[in-house]
Image (cartoon, rainbow, N blue to C red):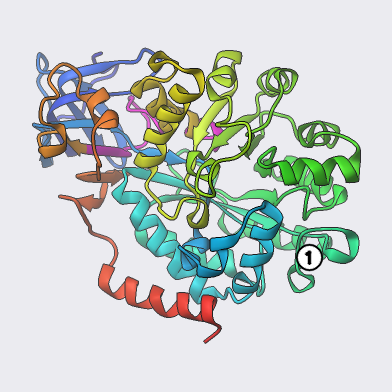
């Protein structure tokens, strides 16, 4: 692939001489000896070893490297990294018990804890090659938590898509939410509109996009779901929630509505191309076809299906979803459902779980998994063409991976497949809009020791109440 318009003679940043530059564009372009030019935060030129790159103010030597688009995290709960390997959860055996076990700790969340968990989580995601992350914060013990997150995300330098989540039914109405965390629907809608007015930027190069997301049918009323949809339509923002992720949820929804969870989402008008849904572990064939026809995206979170011993029925049907035309991205989910925030690892797990479920290696190639982690996530967040691909006019969001190191010894024919089948891997450079967040394998926008100390203090407050 050659650039379609003339590349400026002088650019801000040039990445050159990559072993492979895999664009994940519509044509699946891969350039041996590839180079990529970024100017004013946008990709302005691409070429291979047969074409001359422009002069640049800064040059990155990518020999021995695979260059990919920045990965896009389609589902996350950053505040949950404050309760990793949480001791009281070790004996949890159901989703309902899981919620009640963690809610006592999470009810202590404050603005400082929300901010530092965002800082630490996004820095860890950047180390895994991630340049854009969603985040679903659905409990609000005090106001202003998402404002604190947005400020922290801007400092780290990743693109950020926080979802203003909510829980609106408590135990007195049969919901799975402590009374102190139940919110009034009018207050939720007012705060959501405020967040959109203050932070949401629809421009192609924006760093913050706000979404709307009642948490789940187990803790959100039908009125909350309908009013969230109407507000998202009025403000032209994305809709997000969890669905079809656990047998407990299906039993709850059947008892309350007499329908399957995805059928209820359909009844409430949620199945449209504005919506992306986390997990979708238990869809039937008709529901998969409905999701595809409606243009709904799915955020697949592999570790979530494994960490507590594996969900009944095995991994979700990702290959059948893709074959049916459902757009699928990849998410890390909460730290408590993965206890890590590596989008590279979740992408590898997505590849392996699909192979295991279908019983064949061809069920999910490395490139297919990476396409979910790039193009799939971009489309889920409503940013197709802006992020998740290396093409002229797209944002200059790039991940650079060294494959000349010990874990990749012996990889000769296909370093892209090697990147996912070998490892472990951390990004050598993670670049967002032409700016280094990770450089030479180190976080450059966060004082990591200081952040970790602040995070430890916040974790003690949240977990131990002190």
Residue 86 point in image, percent of width and height: 50, 66
Whether 191 is drawn above or below 2: the answer is below
Q: Is residue 154 magenta?
A: no
Q: Nearer the viewer, residue 267 or 156?
A: 267
Q: Residue at x 10, y 38 (%)?
A: 405
Q: Quadrant of residue 29?
A: top left
Residue 208 point in image, percent of width and height: 50, 51
Whether 116 is drawn above or below 311: the answer is below
Is 406 displayed left or right of 438 in the figure?
left
Residue 63 point in image, percent of width and height: 8, 31
Q: Residue at x 25, y 24 (%)?
A: 416
Q: Nearer the viewer, residue 270 or 178?
A: 178
Q: Which segment did they paint magenta?
A: 378-400
Callout 1: few (<14), some (14-19), or many (20+) C-alpha neighbours within 10 Å?
few
Residue 442 point in image, percent of width and height: 20, 56
Visible in this render: residue 387?
no
Count the labels in the image.
1
The residue furthest bottom is 466
Whether 121 is drawn above or below 244: the answer is below
Q: Main secondary structure of the magenta part?
A: loop
* Quadrant of the frame with the N terminus: top left
Q: Quadrant of residue 323?
A: top right
Is 271 displayed left or right of 380 in the figure?
right
Visible in this render: residue 327?
yes
Q: Residue at x 58, y 68 (%)?
A: 145
Label 1 sits on a secondary structure element that is helix
Which residue carries the number 1 mark? 187
């Amino acid at each position: 692939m050659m650039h379609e318009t003339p590349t400026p003679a002088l650019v801000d940043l040039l990445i050159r001489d990559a072993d492979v530059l895999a664009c994940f564009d519509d044509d699946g372009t891969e350039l041996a000896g590839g180079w990529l030019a970024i100017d004013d935060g946008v990709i302005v030129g691409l070429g291979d070893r047969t074409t001359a790159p422009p002069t640049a103010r800064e040059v990155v030597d990518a020999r021995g490297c695979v260059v990919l688009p920045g990965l896009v995290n389609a589902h996350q709960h950053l505040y949950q990294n404050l309760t990793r390997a949480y001791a009281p959860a070790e004996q949890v055996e159901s989703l309902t018990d899981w919620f009640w076990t963690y809610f006592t700790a999470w009810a202590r969340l404050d603005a400082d804890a929300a901010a530092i968990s965002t800082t630490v989580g996004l820095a860890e995601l950047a180390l895994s090659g991630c340049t854009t992350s969603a985040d679903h914060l659905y409990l609000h013990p005090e106001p202003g938590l998402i404002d604190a997150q947005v400020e922290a995300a801007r400092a780290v330098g990743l693109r950020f898509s926080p979802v203003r989540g909510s829980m609106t039914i408590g135990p007195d109405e049969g919901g799975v939410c402590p009374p102190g965390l139940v919110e009034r629907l009018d207050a939720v809608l007012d705060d959501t509109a405020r967040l959109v007015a203050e932070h949401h930027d629809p421009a192609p190069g924006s760093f913050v996009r706000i979404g709307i997301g009642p948490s789940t049918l187990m803790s959100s009323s039908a009125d909350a779901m309908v009013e969230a949809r109407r507000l998202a339509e009025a403000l032209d923002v994305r809709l997000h929630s969890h669905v079809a992720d656990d047998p407990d949820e299906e039993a709850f929804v059947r008892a309350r509505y007499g329908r399957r969870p995805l059928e209820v989402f359909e009844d409430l008008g949620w199945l449209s191309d504005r919506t992306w849904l986390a997990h979708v572990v238990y869809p039937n064939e008709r529901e998969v076809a409905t999701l595809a026809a409606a243009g709904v995206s799915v955020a697949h979170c592999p570790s979530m299906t494994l960490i507590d011993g594996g969900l009944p029925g095995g991994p979700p049907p990702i290959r059948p979803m893709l074959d049916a035309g459902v757009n699928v991205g990849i998410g890390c989910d909460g730290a408590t459902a993965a206890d890590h925030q590596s989008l590279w690892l979740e992408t590898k797990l997505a590849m392996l779980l699909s192979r295991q479920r279908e019983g064949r290696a061809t069920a999910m190639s490395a490139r297919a998994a990476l396409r979910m982690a790039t193009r799939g996530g971009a489309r889920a967040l409503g940013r197709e063409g802006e992020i998740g691909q290396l093409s002229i006019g797209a944002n200059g969001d790039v991940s650079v991976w060294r494959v000349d190191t010990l874990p990749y010894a012996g990889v000769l024919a296909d370093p892209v497949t090697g990147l996912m089948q070998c490892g472990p891997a951390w990004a050598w450079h993670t670049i967002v809009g032409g700016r280094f967040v990770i450089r030479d394998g180190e976080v450059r926008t966060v004082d990591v020791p200081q952040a970790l100390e602040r995070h430890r203090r916040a974790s003690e407050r949240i977990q131990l109440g002190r």
